[in-house]
Image: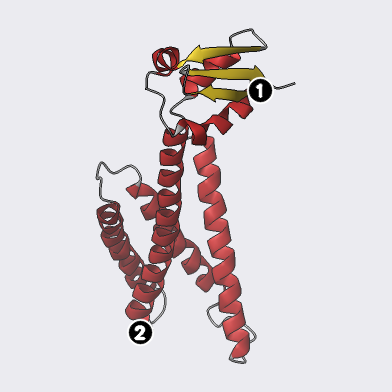
Amino acid sequence: MNQKKWIRIVAVYSIIYTAITLLSSVLYLCNGVYEDPSGNWHELDRVIILLIGIAAFELYTNLPVKPLALRYLIAYIPSQQLAFAYVWFSGLREPLAKTAYRDIWINFTGLFMLLCIINTVIYVLRKREDRRRTVMSKYNALWEYVQKSGKESFHLTFEEIQEVAGIPIDHSFLKYKKELAEYGWQVGKISMKEQTVSFHKVD
Protein backbone atom coordinates (compact mmCIF):
# COMPACT_ATOMS: atom_id res chain seq x y z
CA MET A 1 0.00 0.00 0.00
CA ASN A 2 1.51 3.33 -1.04
CA GLN A 3 1.95 6.38 1.14
CA LYS A 4 -0.91 8.33 -0.47
CA LYS A 5 -3.38 5.57 0.33
CA TRP A 6 -2.21 5.40 3.95
CA ILE A 7 -2.63 9.16 4.25
CA ARG A 8 -6.13 8.92 2.76
CA ILE A 9 -7.13 6.14 5.17
CA VAL A 10 -5.83 8.04 8.19
CA ALA A 11 -7.56 11.22 7.02
CA VAL A 12 -10.91 9.46 6.50
CA TYR A 13 -10.59 7.71 9.87
CA SER A 14 -9.78 10.96 11.67
CA ILE A 15 -12.60 12.91 10.04
CA ILE A 16 -15.23 10.26 10.77
CA TYR A 17 -14.02 9.73 14.35
CA THR A 18 -14.10 13.48 15.00
CA ALA A 19 -17.58 13.82 13.49
CA ILE A 20 -18.96 10.89 15.52
CA THR A 21 -17.39 12.17 18.73
CA LEU A 22 -18.80 15.66 18.22
CA LEU A 23 -22.24 14.28 17.41
CA SER A 24 -22.18 12.05 20.48
CA SER A 25 -21.14 14.97 22.70
CA VAL A 26 -23.88 17.21 21.31
CA LEU A 27 -26.51 14.52 21.89
CA TYR A 28 -25.34 14.03 25.49
CA LEU A 29 -25.46 17.78 26.14
CA CYS A 30 -28.93 18.08 24.59
CA ASN A 31 -30.13 15.35 26.98
CA GLY A 32 -28.64 17.16 29.97
CA VAL A 33 -25.73 14.72 30.39
CA TYR A 34 -22.50 16.62 30.91
CA GLU A 35 -20.15 13.66 31.30
CA ASP A 36 -19.90 10.46 29.26
CA PRO A 37 -21.20 7.75 31.64
CA SER A 38 -18.94 5.11 30.06
CA GLY A 39 -15.87 7.31 30.19
CA ASN A 40 -12.70 6.15 28.44
CA TRP A 41 -14.16 2.74 27.62
CA HIS A 42 -16.71 4.42 25.40
CA GLU A 43 -13.95 6.19 23.48
CA LEU A 44 -12.00 2.96 23.11
CA ASP A 45 -15.08 1.13 21.83
CA ARG A 46 -15.64 3.84 19.25
CA VAL A 47 -12.01 3.64 18.11
CA ILE A 48 -12.13 -0.14 17.63
CA ILE A 49 -15.54 -0.28 15.90
CA LEU A 50 -14.53 2.51 13.54
CA LEU A 51 -11.23 0.75 12.87
CA ILE A 52 -13.11 -2.45 11.96
CA GLY A 53 -15.34 -0.52 9.57
CA ILE A 54 -12.54 1.36 7.83
CA ALA A 55 -10.34 -1.75 7.56
CA ALA A 56 -13.20 -3.79 6.09
CA PHE A 57 -14.06 -1.04 3.64
CA GLU A 58 -10.48 -0.79 2.44
CA LEU A 59 -10.36 -4.57 2.09
CA TYR A 60 -13.01 -4.57 -0.64
CA THR A 61 -10.73 -2.58 -2.99
CA ASN A 62 -8.40 -5.57 -3.29
CA LEU A 63 -11.13 -8.12 -3.97
CA PRO A 64 -11.14 -9.59 -7.51
CA VAL A 65 -14.89 -9.02 -7.83
CA LYS A 66 -16.27 -6.70 -10.50
CA PRO A 67 -19.77 -5.70 -9.28
CA LEU A 68 -19.22 -2.88 -6.81
CA ALA A 69 -22.29 -3.83 -4.75
CA LEU A 70 -21.02 -7.40 -4.35
CA ARG A 71 -17.66 -6.13 -3.10
CA TYR A 72 -19.44 -4.04 -0.49
CA LEU A 73 -21.51 -7.02 0.62
CA ILE A 74 -18.51 -9.34 0.88
CA ALA A 75 -16.68 -6.79 3.02
CA TYR A 76 -19.74 -5.89 5.12
CA ILE A 77 -20.89 -9.32 6.33
CA PRO A 78 -17.68 -10.51 8.05
CA SER A 79 -16.90 -7.04 9.41
CA GLN A 80 -20.38 -6.75 10.94
CA GLN A 81 -19.88 -10.16 12.53
CA LEU A 82 -16.56 -8.95 13.90
CA ALA A 83 -18.29 -5.89 15.36
CA PHE A 84 -20.85 -8.17 17.03
CA ALA A 85 -17.98 -10.26 18.42
CA TYR A 86 -16.43 -7.14 19.90
CA VAL A 87 -19.73 -6.21 21.56
CA TRP A 88 -19.91 -9.70 23.05
CA PHE A 89 -16.34 -9.35 24.30
CA SER A 90 -17.11 -5.97 25.86
CA GLY A 91 -19.95 -7.69 27.72
CA LEU A 92 -17.29 -9.55 29.72
CA ARG A 93 -16.11 -6.17 30.96
CA GLU A 94 -19.47 -4.77 31.96
CA PRO A 95 -23.15 -5.70 31.52
CA LEU A 96 -24.50 -4.94 28.05
CA ALA A 97 -27.55 -2.82 27.42
CA LYS A 98 -30.57 -4.72 26.14
CA THR A 99 -30.28 -2.92 22.82
CA ALA A 100 -26.48 -3.31 22.50
CA TYR A 101 -26.54 -5.56 19.44
CA ARG A 102 -29.29 -3.58 17.76
CA ASP A 103 -27.43 -0.33 18.37
CA ILE A 104 -24.14 -1.65 17.00
CA TRP A 105 -25.94 -3.01 13.95
CA ILE A 106 -27.60 0.34 13.26
CA ASN A 107 -24.45 2.37 13.89
CA PHE A 108 -22.09 0.07 12.02
CA THR A 109 -24.43 -0.38 9.06
CA GLY A 110 -25.03 3.36 8.89
CA LEU A 111 -21.29 4.04 8.91
CA PHE A 112 -20.63 1.41 6.27
CA MET A 113 -23.44 2.68 4.03
CA LEU A 114 -22.10 6.23 4.31
CA LEU A 115 -18.66 5.04 3.21
CA CYS A 116 -20.23 3.06 0.35
CA ILE A 117 -22.19 6.08 -0.86
CA ILE A 118 -19.15 8.36 -0.75
CA ASN A 119 -16.98 5.79 -2.49
CA THR A 120 -19.62 5.09 -5.15
CA VAL A 121 -20.00 8.79 -5.94
CA ILE A 122 -16.21 9.13 -6.26
CA TYR A 123 -16.08 5.98 -8.40
CA VAL A 124 -18.80 7.25 -10.77
CA LEU A 125 -17.21 10.70 -11.07
CA ARG A 126 -13.82 9.17 -11.86
CA LYS A 127 -15.36 6.90 -14.50
CA ARG A 128 -17.06 9.87 -16.12
CA GLU A 129 -13.83 11.85 -16.08
CA ASP A 130 -11.93 8.93 -17.60
CA ARG A 131 -14.53 8.61 -20.36
CA ARG A 132 -14.45 12.35 -20.98
CA ARG A 133 -10.67 12.32 -21.25
CA THR A 134 -10.79 9.38 -23.60
CA VAL A 135 -13.24 11.16 -25.88
CA MET A 136 -11.53 14.54 -25.61
CA SER A 137 -8.15 12.99 -26.40
CA LYS A 138 -9.06 11.45 -29.78
CA TYR A 139 -6.86 14.01 -31.56
CA ASN A 140 -3.95 14.00 -29.11
CA ALA A 141 -1.62 12.44 -31.66
CA LEU A 142 -2.43 15.27 -34.07
CA TRP A 143 -1.94 17.98 -31.46
CA GLU A 144 1.45 16.56 -30.49
CA TYR A 145 2.45 16.38 -34.16
CA VAL A 146 1.50 20.03 -34.66
CA GLN A 147 3.37 21.11 -31.53
CA LYS A 148 6.55 19.33 -32.62
CA SER A 149 6.40 20.61 -36.18
CA GLY A 150 8.92 23.40 -35.49
CA LYS A 151 6.98 25.81 -37.70
CA GLU A 152 5.03 28.99 -37.00
CA SER A 153 2.14 27.97 -39.25
CA PHE A 154 1.34 25.32 -41.82
CA HIS A 155 -1.53 23.27 -43.19
CA LEU A 156 -2.39 19.61 -43.49
CA THR A 157 -4.77 17.84 -45.80
CA PHE A 158 -7.62 15.76 -44.39
CA GLU A 159 -5.79 12.67 -45.56
CA GLU A 160 -2.60 13.69 -43.76
CA ILE A 161 -4.58 14.38 -40.59
CA GLN A 162 -6.06 10.90 -40.77
CA GLU A 163 -2.60 9.39 -41.11
CA VAL A 164 -1.27 11.34 -38.11
CA ALA A 165 -4.33 11.03 -35.84
CA GLY A 166 -5.21 7.49 -36.82
CA ILE A 167 -8.84 8.49 -37.34
CA PRO A 168 -10.61 10.35 -40.15
CA ILE A 169 -11.47 14.00 -39.56
CA ASP A 170 -15.20 14.59 -39.09
CA HIS A 171 -17.60 17.25 -37.83
CA SER A 172 -16.51 16.59 -34.23
CA PHE A 173 -13.17 18.20 -35.12
CA LEU A 174 -14.86 21.58 -34.70
CA LYS A 175 -15.66 20.68 -31.10
CA TYR A 176 -12.25 19.29 -30.21
CA LYS A 177 -10.05 21.83 -31.98
CA LYS A 178 -10.03 24.02 -28.84
CA GLU A 179 -7.83 21.37 -27.18
CA LEU A 180 -4.94 22.54 -29.38
CA ALA A 181 -4.72 25.76 -27.33
CA GLU A 182 -3.24 23.71 -24.49
CA TYR A 183 -0.31 22.94 -26.81
CA GLY A 184 0.32 26.59 -27.70
CA TRP A 185 -1.36 26.37 -31.10
CA GLN A 186 -4.71 27.12 -32.68
CA VAL A 187 -6.67 25.78 -35.61
CA GLY A 188 -7.03 28.28 -38.42
CA LYS A 189 -9.01 27.99 -41.64
CA ILE A 190 -10.73 24.71 -42.43
CA SER A 191 -11.25 24.43 -46.18
CA MET A 192 -13.83 21.89 -47.21
CA LYS A 193 -13.16 22.69 -50.86
CA GLU A 194 -9.41 22.05 -50.69
CA GLN A 195 -9.74 19.47 -47.90
CA THR A 196 -7.13 21.22 -45.74
CA VAL A 197 -6.76 22.60 -42.23
CA SER A 198 -4.33 25.37 -41.30
CA PHE A 199 -2.55 25.59 -37.94
CA HIS A 200 -0.97 28.65 -36.33
CA LYS A 201 1.32 28.95 -33.35
CA VAL A 202 -0.04 31.20 -30.60
CA ASP A 203 2.29 34.07 -29.65
State which quadrant residue 36 falls in: bottom right
Q: Nearer the viewer, mark 2 or mark 1?
A: 1
Residue 202 is left or right of residue 21, and the answer is right
Measured as percent of width and height from the top left, residue 173 is found at 47, 30
138 w.r.t. 159: above or below: below
Measured as percent of width and height from the top left, residue 133 is found at 46, 36
87 w.r.t. 116: above or below: below
Which element is circle 2 on? loop
Kindly identify which residue carries mark 1: 184
Residue at 56% in and 15% down = 146
**Amino acid residing under circle 2:** Thr
Measured as percent of width and height from the top left, residue 90 is found at 39, 71
Kindly identify which residue carries mark 2: 99
Q: Residue furthest top?
A: 150
Residue at 40% in and 17% down = 162
Q: Is the residue marked by circle 2 packed among few (<14), some (14-19), or many (20+) residues within 10 Å?
A: few
Quarter that holds the N terminus: top left
79 w.r.t. 8: above or below: below
Which element is circle 1 on? loop
Question: Which one is in front, 114 or 10?
Answer: 114
Q: Which mark is residue 167?
A: none
Question: Which one is in front, 199 or 90?
Answer: 199
State which quadrant residue 4 falls in: top right
Question: Which one is in front, 177 or 37?
Answer: 177
